[in-house]
Structure formats: structure tokens, C-alpha cells
């Protein structure tokens, strides 16, 4: 992994991978969502609203996975001073926030016909909303530290501390009474019928590829901006 | 009496939010990356 700590080496790999990951993500996600919309059967209890599963669940997992990745990158930045770790954490924040927002919105839309309400202040929904606020605060802090030229240490600490919310989201449906159902898929086990499980896994692969492609694109953008600023500063000093 | 809800309205609304949000994010990130890399190339030429 430390081989990719070199930005030049990382950029060579990122240039090759960004577009294929985005294309693969579009194809897999498009296929899974088309199946969900036109071919998936209606479920016995939830009827046609079960089709929302193919968007809601992958975006929920990636919203939580995104912050887990931010925490790992922050740890790597603080402990090993990995030069690309801070860049990776900043690049993850926007897709993480967008997927968390999509999860909350699709969940709310699903809640109205399923539960008879758009929103309830229970453990799962509230902790997911807190995750969105954490992402927004992280993006604001990243923008401020970048503008002021401050150290990324505060941001990395914030990334680590915010990870406390991830197990709270995961276990919220077990710890507290909730309208939200308990997990249907746990390590190696699934209570889901195969006609829902397989397209869900394909949708998850597609959204993950899109997430990875967007993170690489944003890392390339941040590195290009840093290189441009460094060059302009050098030219200003020389003249 | 409970109002009758057409489930398909909710399904379509959820898909519209998910697809539009994902495509907008991917497109915006791609365009921002290309613009930043072009700015870097222009700065090299100066």
C-alpha cells in the first residue's frame, strides 16, 4: 500500500481506473435498477414499494462505509503521515454525503406507504441524519482548512471521532424499538429471497464502483489543484 | 377512511431522487476533475 503513497505513482493508476470504474458502475447500477423497476416481483407485504430497496440499501451501506473509510484514512494520516490519506478522506466526503442524503430521502419516501409517515425520530433514522450532519460539517471544515492553509490534523481527528456514530447506526435497530426493520443480511446469512438478494448485490457492486470512480476523480481534482497552486506560488516567488 | 396510496408514485419518486443525485454527483466530479487538470496543464505552459 505504501507504494501508492507516492502521488505520481497513484496518479498513473488513477488515470487508468477512473473512467472504467464510472462506466462499470453506470452499467451495473443501471441494470440492477432496471430490473428493480420493471422485472422484480412485488413483495407479499410491502407490495411494489419493495423496489425502493435497490437504491435505499446500497446508498445506506455506502454512506456508512464512506465514513468508515474517512476514519481509516484519518488514522493513517495521523499515525503514518501517509501523504495521500488526507486527500483520500477529503475526496470521500462528498460522495458519502450524497449517498447518505439519497438514503434518507428514499427511506422517507418508502416510509410514507410502508409506515404511514414520512419521518419518525427513532434511533436508526436519527443516527443516519446525524451522519449526514457529520459529513456536512466535515466538508465545511475541509474547505476552511484548505482556504486558510491550516494543518489537516483537526480534520483527521474529526474524521476519527465521527466514526463513533457508525456502530450506533448499525446497532440502533437492535438497541431501541424502531419502525425500521432489523438487518435482513448479516455476515454470511440472508433472510432475503434470491430474486431480491442477487439484484441487490449487483446494485451494491454498481453503486460501489460509482463511489470508487467519484473518489478517484475527486482525488485527481484535489491533487491537480494542489500542484497548480504550488506552481503558481513558485512562479510568483521567482518573479 | 384511509386515503388510497398509489405505491408506484413513491417508487418513481425514490428512483428519480436516487438516479438524479448519483448522476449529478458523478458528472460534477468528472467535470471538476477535468477542469482542475486543464488548469494545471495551462499553468505548466506559463
Image (spheres, grey):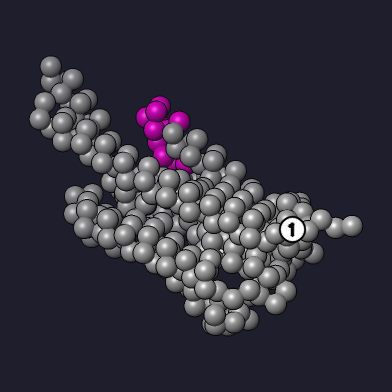
Q: Point out residue A193 in the picture as x, y percentages from the top left corner.
A: 59, 82
* A46 magenta-colored: no
The residue at the far left in this view is B45
* A145 magenta-colored: yes
Residue A117 can be seen in this image: yes
Q: Nearer the viewer, residue A143 or A160?
A: A143
**Residues packed near mark 1 inside 10 Å, few (<14), some (14 to 19) or many (20 plus):** few
Q: Is B6 displayed left or right of A70 in the figure?
A: right
Q: Is residue A133 above or below residue B7?
A: above
Q: Point out residue A41 in the picture as x, y percentages from the top left corner.
A: 59, 76
The residue at the far right in this view is B1
Q: Is A72 displayed left or right of A226 in the figure?
A: right
Q: Is residue A156 above or below residue A24?
A: above
What is the quadrant of the N terminus of chain B in the image?
bottom right
Q: Point out residue A171 in the picture as x, y percentages from the top left corner.
A: 67, 66
Q: Quadrant of residue A145?
A: top left
Q: Which residues are magenta?
A: A144-155
Residue A154 can be seen in this image: no
Provide the residue designation for mark 1.
B5
Q: Is A132 displayed left or right of A119 in the figure?
A: left
Element on which disc 1 rests: loop
Name the chief secondary structure element in magenta.
helix
Q: Nearer the viewer, residue A70 or A2?
A: A70
Q: Residue at x 44, y 34 (%)?
A: A143
Q: Is residue A36 above or below residue A11?
A: below
Amino acid at each position: 500500500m505504501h507504494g501508492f503513497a507516492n502521488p505520481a505513482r497513484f496518479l498513473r493508476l488513477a488515470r487508468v481506473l477512473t473512467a472504467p470504474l464510472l462506466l462499470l458502475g453506470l452499467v451495473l447500477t443501471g441494470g440492477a435498477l432496471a430490473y428493480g423497476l420493471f422485472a422484480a416481483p412485488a413483495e407479499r407485504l410491502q407490495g411494489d414499494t419493495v423496489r425502493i430497496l435497490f437504491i435505499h440499501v446500497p446508498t445506506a451501506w455506502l454512506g456508512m462505509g464512506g465514513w468508515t473509510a474517512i476514519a481509516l484514512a484519518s488514522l493513517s494520516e495521523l499515525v503514518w503521515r501517509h501523504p495521500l490519506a488526507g486527500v483520500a478522506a477529503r475526496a470521500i466526503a462528498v460522495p458519502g454525503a450524497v449517498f447518505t442524503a439519497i438514503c434518507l430521502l428514499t427511506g422517507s419516501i418508502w416510509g410514507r406507504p410502508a409506515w404511514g409517515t414520512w419521518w419518525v425520530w427513532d434511533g436508526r433514522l436519527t443516527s443516519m441524519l446525524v451522519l449526514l450532519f457529520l459529513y456536512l460539517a466535515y466538508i465545511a471544515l475541509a474547505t476552511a482548512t484548505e482556504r486558510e492553509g491550516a494543518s489537516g490534523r483537526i480534520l483527521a481527528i474529526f474524521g476519527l471521532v465521527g466514526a463513533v456514530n457508525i456502530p450506533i447506526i448499525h446497532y440502533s435497530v437492535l438497541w431501541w424499538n424502531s419502525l425500521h426493520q432489523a438487518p435482513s443480511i448479516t455476515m454470511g446469512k440472508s433472510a432475503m429471497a434470491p430474486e431480491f438478494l442477487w439484484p441487490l448485490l449487483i446494485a451494491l457492486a454498481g453503486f460501489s464502483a460509482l463511489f470508487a470512480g467519484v473518489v478517484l476523480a475527486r482525488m485527481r481534482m484535489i491533487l491537480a489543484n494542489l500542484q497548480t497552486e504550488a506552481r503558481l506560488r513558485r512562479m510568483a516567488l521567482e518573479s | 377512511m384511509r386515503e388510497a396510496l398509489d405505491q408506484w408514485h413513491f417508487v418513481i419518486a425514490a428512483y428519480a431522487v436516487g438516479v438524479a443525485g448519483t448522476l449529478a454527483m458523478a458528472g460534477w466530479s468528472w467535470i471538476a476533475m477535468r477542469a482542475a487538470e486543464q488548469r494545471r496543464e495551462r499553468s505548466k505552459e506559463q
